[in-house]
Every structure is written in C-alpha cells, then in structure tokens.
Amino acid sequence: MEQATKFKVQDKATGAFFNCASNQSLLVAMERTNPGLIKVGCRGGGCGLCKIRVVEGDYLTKAMSRKQVSVTEEAQGYALACRAYPRTNLMFEVVASSQQTD
Ligand code: FES
C-alpha cells in the first residue's frame, strides 16, 4: 500500500496555506481548512465550479470534463480541484467560474 505523503498547498491570492495528502483531492483539503475559498459543486469533475490554475508544483488529475478544462488549458496548469491530487508542494489560484462557450 502506498503511503500518503502530505504536501503544503498555498492559495496565491490570499497567501493561505493548507496541507493536502497525496491521496486527497485539493478540493477536500481546501474545504476542510479554508471553507469558502472555493465554490463546490458536483465533486466529480463535471461542473467547473472548483476550477483552479496551478502556478507552481506538480499534481495528477483524474478525469475532468473537457467542457470545463480544454486540452490547451490543462497544459497551462488549469485543473478542477475536486480531481487534482498533489505530487509536490503547490501554489495555485482560484479561477472565477466563467461561462465560456468556445
Ligand atoms: S466540484 Fe464540480 S468540477 Fe469540481
């Protein structure tokens, strides 16, 4: 069994730090320590409410809706916090939910 490692995650805008284990989504860790920092919706990578952009560090993602995060955006560090798991310490910013149609 792989042992979970804890990483430090920081919100760039507020400077708030929290811990997130490697087997825990960023959303769950954020909700636990900084409720209100991010909007929560489906928790399953579909609604886009929890969209973030990782500006520093490595992470893994599970399946995310392509409507919410395009291939280009994914390459730029955009991710859905409910589907993102840290692999190193991270810094991110919350992305205001946008209604992009293209
Ligand atoms: S909560 Fe819906 S995509 Fe993360």
Image: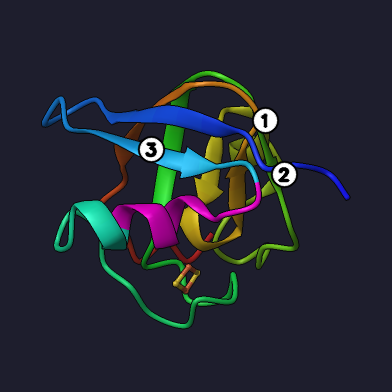
Q: Is residue 72 above or below residue 91?
A: below
In the image, 2: left or right of 68?
Answer: right
Is residue 59 visible in the rendered structure shown here? yes
C-alpha separation, residue under disc 3 versus residue under disc 2: 28 Å
In percent of width and height, residue 55 lies at: 44, 21
**Badge 2: few (under 14), some or many (20 or more) residues near its Cα, within 10 Å?**
few
| Residue 51, image quadrant | bottom left
In percent of width and height, residue 82 lies at: 51, 62
Of circles 1 and 3, which is in front? Answer: 3
Ligand 1 closer than 8 Å to the CB at disc 3?
A: no
Q: What amino acid is found at the position of numbered circle 2 in the picture?
A: Val
Residue 75 bears which disc, if any?
1
**Kind of element beneath mark 2:** helix
**Kind of element beneath mark 3:** strand
Image colouring: rainbow
Q: Mark 3 sits on what residue?
A: 19
The reply to whether the C-beta atoms of the residues labelled 1 and 3 are less than 8 Å apart is: no
Is residue 97 visible in the rendered structure shown here? no
Query: Looking at the magenta stretch, what is its main secondary structure?
Result: helix
**Kind of element beneath mark 1:** helix
User: Of marks 1 and 3, which one's residue comes earlier in the chain?
Assistant: 3
Image quarter of the C terminus: bottom right
**Badge 3: few (under 14), some or many (20 or more) residues near its Cα, within 10 Å?**
many
Q: What amino acid is found at the position of numbered circle 3 in the picture?
A: Asn
The magenta stretch spans which residues?
Answer: 23-30
In percent of width and height, residue 78 lies at: 52, 40
Q: What amino acid is found at the position of numbered circle 1 in the picture?
A: Ala
Q: Residue at x 50, y 76 (%)?
A: 43
Q: Mark 2 sits on what residue?
A: 71
The reply to whether the C-beta atoms of the residues labelled 1 and 2 are less than 8 Å apart is: yes
Ligand 1 closer than 8 Å to the CB at disc 2?
A: no
